[in-house]
Every structure is written in structure tokens, then in C-alpha cells.
Amino acid sequence: MSGVPSYVSGISDEPLLYRSVGGVLSDAAEKWAETEALVVRHQAIRWTYRELDRRVTELARGLLALGLRPGDRVGIWSPNNAEWILTQFATARAGMILVNINPAYRASELSHALRKVGCRALILALAHKSSNYVSIFRSCDPFPELEYVIQLGPGAVPGMLAFQDLLSSSEVALPVTDPDEPVNIQFTSGTTGLPKGATLSHFNIVNNGLFVARGMATQAGDRICVPVPLYHCFGMVMGVLGAVTHGATVVLPAESFDAHSTLAAIAEERCTALYGVPTMFIAELEHPRFREFDLSSLRTGIMAGAPCPIAIMQRVIAEMHMEQITICYGMTETSPVSFQSGVDDPLEKRVGTVGRIHPHAQVKLIDADGNVVPRGERGELLTRGYNVMRGYWGDPERTAECLDAAGWMHTGDLATLDEEGYCSIVGRVKDMIIRGGENIYPREIEEYLLRHPKVLDVAVVGVPDRQYGEVVCAVIRLRERATCTEDEILDFCREQIAHFKVPRFVRFVEVFPMTVTGKVQKYLLREQQIQELGRS
């Protein structure tokens, strides 16, 4: 393998689709008019493709009649609901740019997002969980460019327009939309600095949704359970656009993830596919009533958004009937997917890798000097192709830091490619622990510790050490009612993994600090452990 470079290019008999987001919905409404497009269980909504398309056109005309224009940025700050999906397509059909705002944002983050991209309109829910969105919004300093604030839900909030009042049957002319124009801005939750606004085009996300759904063998009439947040690519691109390009039904089980609601939705709606990050699948498998739900309709789906533990993948296949589940890998800046396992890949490839390169995308792995590494060796993953973002909105310097002159997106992820082109993600460049000159990749230790029968989930971080520079700290969530000691974990590791990989510290916690999309915030976890262990 040493003579073969770590470079792969995705080939396909199917060409890229030169179509706008609004255009693919129009196509679906014509082709699958009476097929259910959207089921929102917590709102008791069931819309066919014909009805969804009609409502989207009404909202697009309403936004234009309000005074908004093509190119304007429209923010949406809301948990999952039908209005979110209407807004996703209506802003696109009106030539506007949808700005996804994380439902967990507080005042400073909201202010940054709205000011950074100059939103002219904001659509917001009244409240969700512990967040009173109206109060948070009003606590912010005025936004000079923000002219319209539109509320979701009942009642009238002074100074805000009602979403329902925007649905218009007027004959406002809709613009012709160029698929290469930006359609969406998503803020990335970086580990340092303020969030960056990744700017994605119609062409980016329509095609990524198309090929992700194709990768899990989606067919017209499939029913996809989408408990992941719509504000993220996983929900709005892989979920919604993937379904629309194939005539499938999107099923939203709740406003935000709830294991019971998800299991009930699968059983009662006879869903054939399920999406989720590993922590969601863990919550479903560990739910006390898991065995009561008939999940036999499931066939396929996607686990993505964070490294997928092999043990969890095996349980999902065996206990949730998802024999054709696929793994996806990517990032917001790449629309998001660049690797996906196949439904007919051997089990060891589907549980041990993130699959092979997506159609029409390219990837290479490089060392610290920028040289392509041989197959089988670790290197930073770079990707290039139709799926790479246009850049970070209004931030050319930070764009140039990760998007080079040749069009390669530097992901910051460490990976290997085998001789067949299967990719394994082995960690983050910044997460790598260097102990006395030995490079340690946390993912290896995490995968090993997940074999322990008492371990439900684990995150490995490096903490400072005077002798070695850094040492390994394993932070563990135990299974329900399980008890375990540090010595028990260390005994499990000794003589089984290299001595320098054996954790110096073992910590037990109830929860990890998480992003809304289910990724462990390792930088916060590391800071917590440094403080609690008294190491600096």
C-alpha cells in the first residue's frame, strides 16, 4: 500500500442536478402530488407534496409582499416544526438566504449571528424548553438592519408579525433562482472564537441531499424519521432535501429529540428509515420501554454527526432491524457529506469505517508538511468538489484559513484510507494527545473502552502533565444501575492496549457537555477535567 497515495475521487453514472431548492420541491409536487411529504406528529400535521408546495408558494409570495427582496437574509430561530420546513423552501423560492439559528443560542450568540450576516427578518418561536425567545431577543441591543420580526405560535406579541398572516395567495411574481446562488447560512460551533457562517448554495445542498438519500437506497414512499434538528445540515439537507429528491415522507416526531417520541413515531408511522447521532441511538436502545415498540418497519437510515462506536452500530443493526443503516461523515462546510458507507457493504466495513467517497467529491490526506500520505497512514482529511461551501459569510480571513487556493477544504480531521478506498476517522488534529513524544489518538482508546460491559459512553481527552507533557484522561458514562471503579477500568486496559495509551485518570460523569447536534464538546470536557484534577 505504501506506493498508493491517499487520494480518492467519487465517480457516478448519475450527473449532478442543476436545480434550485424551490425547483426540486416543484418537481416533487408534480411527480408525487398525493404522496405524504411531511408528517409533524406534535402539530398533528399531514401534508402531501401538492399541499406543501402550495403553502411554500404562499409564504414565498408573502415574504416578497412584505418588502423582502432576493438576496436578503432571513433568520429562523425555532425548534423542529412545520413552519421551519415551510420557511426553508419559501425563502429559497423567493431568492432569499435562510440563516439557521441554533435553538440553544442565548443573547450574545443571537446578536452575533444576526449582526454578522445582516438579517432583515427573523422568524422565531415564542419559547422552547428553558429558553424564552421573546425575552432573549428583547434583551439584545437593537439590530439596525433587522426590519421584520415574525412570531410562530398563537397570540399576538407587540411589535411582531404573525407567521400565519404571511401566507398569501397574492400574485406577487417569484424570481428566477440561480442554483449557484447562496441559499443558506449555517453557523459552525467551532471550539475557539465566535461561530462562523458557512455559506451554502442551492447546488451544494440539493446535490448532497440527493446523493445521501441515494446512498441509503431511498425510494419513493419511504418514511424517514427525523429526530435530529432542522437547523443543522443533518436535518434540513440529509433529511428534508434527501426525502424531497426521492418522493419520501419526512416524519418529525417532536420539537426536539426525545427517545420515547422517536420510538413511538417509528412504530406508529411505520418508518422505514431513522436518522440520528450516536447519543440518540444510545438513548433509544437504553429506553426502559424500548422492547414495547414494533420497529420491524425499519430498514435503513443514517448514523452520523459524531464518531460512531462500533458496539452501538452493532446493536442498532441487531435490535432495531436496521440491516441497511449507513454511516455518513462530513462537516457543515461541505454541505455536509463526503463519505458514506453502502447498504450492501460488509458489516466490518459498515461498523469500522465511514464508507467510501461520495459521488463527484474528492478527498486527499496530507501530513503536517502538506504532502499526500500513502494509503494506510494517518493524515489530515481535505475535500474538494461541488459540496464545498462558498466561504464564511463576511469573513475572508477565516475562509482562507481552511479553504486553500486550489479549492481544498481542510477539515481538521485525522483519517486513514485503505486499499479499497474505505475511510476511517481516527480523531481530530487538535484532539491528538502527545505523551512523551508518543502520538495518541483518543478514538482508539474510546473504541476499546466501549467493549467494557459497564461502559455506556466514553470520551478521552488529554490533560497537562509535568513529566510527559500530556497524559490520557478517560471520562466515562456508565450504564444504568452499573457501578464501577477506576481500578476496574485500568485493569481492563492493562496488557490489552499499549502502556502509554492506558488512562492516567479515569473519571465518571452523568452527562457530557454536548452541542445540540449531539457532539461531545471535548474542549469543555478537557477544561472541566483540568480544573477538577487541579492540573494546569
Image: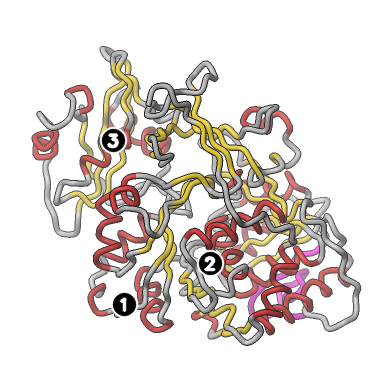
Kind of residue at badge 3:
Glu
Q: Which mark is residue 128?
A: 2
Mark 1 or mark 3, which has the lower sequence index? Answer: 1
Name the outermost residue toward the front. Answer: 13
Q: What residue would you read off at disc 1?
A: 296
Marks 2/1: CA distance?
32 Å
Q: What residue would you read off at disc 3?
A: 444
Q: Nearer the viewer, mark 3 or mark 2?
A: 3
Q: Identify the residue shown where x is 13% and y is 39%.
A: 489
What is the x, y in percent for residue 399? 68, 33
Q: Measured along the vertical axis of the image, is residue 122 above or below residue 488? A: below
Kind of residue at badge 2:
His
Marks 1/3: CA distance?
33 Å
What is the x, y in percent for residue 441? 33, 30
Q: Identify the residue shown where x is 69% and y is 71%.
A: 25
Residue 153 in magenta stretch: yes
Q: Which residues are magenta?
A: 148-165
Q: Quadrant of residue 465?
A: top left
Mark 2 or mark 1, which has the lower sequence index? Answer: 2
